[in-house]
């Protein structure tokens, strides 16, 4: 994976981690407002989704786009179909 994609995905996952910690703290509070908890959960989902998109784009740029040059197009198509199951 390209270094830039690695750093961007890591940043997004750190954001998700922070939101997740906030959710746990909120749930420890008996007065936590349900809608605030749901908002934080949605933020985690968004950050995870964004990280997944960054990783997929990195894979496309680093491996799929160059597969024909390496002569492994068939294998890359199979690998890409597998990767798309996780998006």
Image: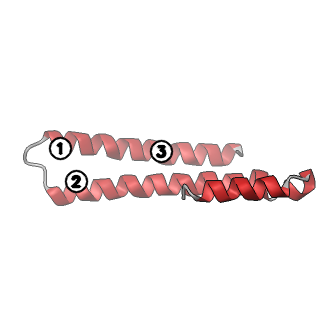
Q: Quadrant of the N terminus?
A: top right
Locate residue 48, reporting x and y percent: 46, 52
Q: Earlier in the sequence, mark 1 or mark 2?
A: 1
SS at circle 3: helix
Residue depicted at 54% across the width and 42% down the height: 10
Query: Extreme left residue here?
Result: 31
Q: CA distance from mark 3 to mark 2?
A: 19 Å
| Tag 3 and tag 1, C-beta contact below 8 Å | no
Depth check, front residue: 74 or 58: 74
> Dot 2: within a 10 Å radius of its alpha carbon, few (fewer than 14), some, or many (20 or more) residues?
some
Q: Quadrant of residue 6?
A: top right
Circle 1 — which element? helix
Identify the residue at horizontal 30%, vertical 40% (top origin): 21
Cβ–Cβ under 8 Å for marks 3 and 2: no
Q: Position of residue 4 (x, y in %)?
A: 67, 47
Residue 49 appears at what percent x and percent y?
48, 57
Residue at horizontal 19 percent and vertical 60 percent from the top: 35
Using the numbered discs, state the Cα–Cα distance from disc 1 to disc 2 in whole angstroms. Answer: 8 Å
Q: Determine which residue is flagged by label 1.
A: 27
| Badge 3: residue crowd in 10 Å (few <14, some 14–19, many ≥20) | some
- Specify the quadrant that holds the C terminus: bottom right
> Residue 11: x, y in percent?
51, 45
What secondary structure is marked by label 2?
helix
Question: Which residue lies at the image location 91% right of the left edge and 53% below the top edge?
Answer: 71
Write down the residue under mark 3. 13
Q: CA distance from mark 3 to mark 1?
A: 21 Å
Please give the residue where the numbered disc 2 appears in the rendered image.
37
- Indicate which disc, 3 or 1, sits on the residue closer to the N terminus: 3
**Left or right position of 52 against 70:** left
| Residues tagged 1 and 2 counted as in contact (Cβ below 8 A) | yes
């Amino acid at each position: 994976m390209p270094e830039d994609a690695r750093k961007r995905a890591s940043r997004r996952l750190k954001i998700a981690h922070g939101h997740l910690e906030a959710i746990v703290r909120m749930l420890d509070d008996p007065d936590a407002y349900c809608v605030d908890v749901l908002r934080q959960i949605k933020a985690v989902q968004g950050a995870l989704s964004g990280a997944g998109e960054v990783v997929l784009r990195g894979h496309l740029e680093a491996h799929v786009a160059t597969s024909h040059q390496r002569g492994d197009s068939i294998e890359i198509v199979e690998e890409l179909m597998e990767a798309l199951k996780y998006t």
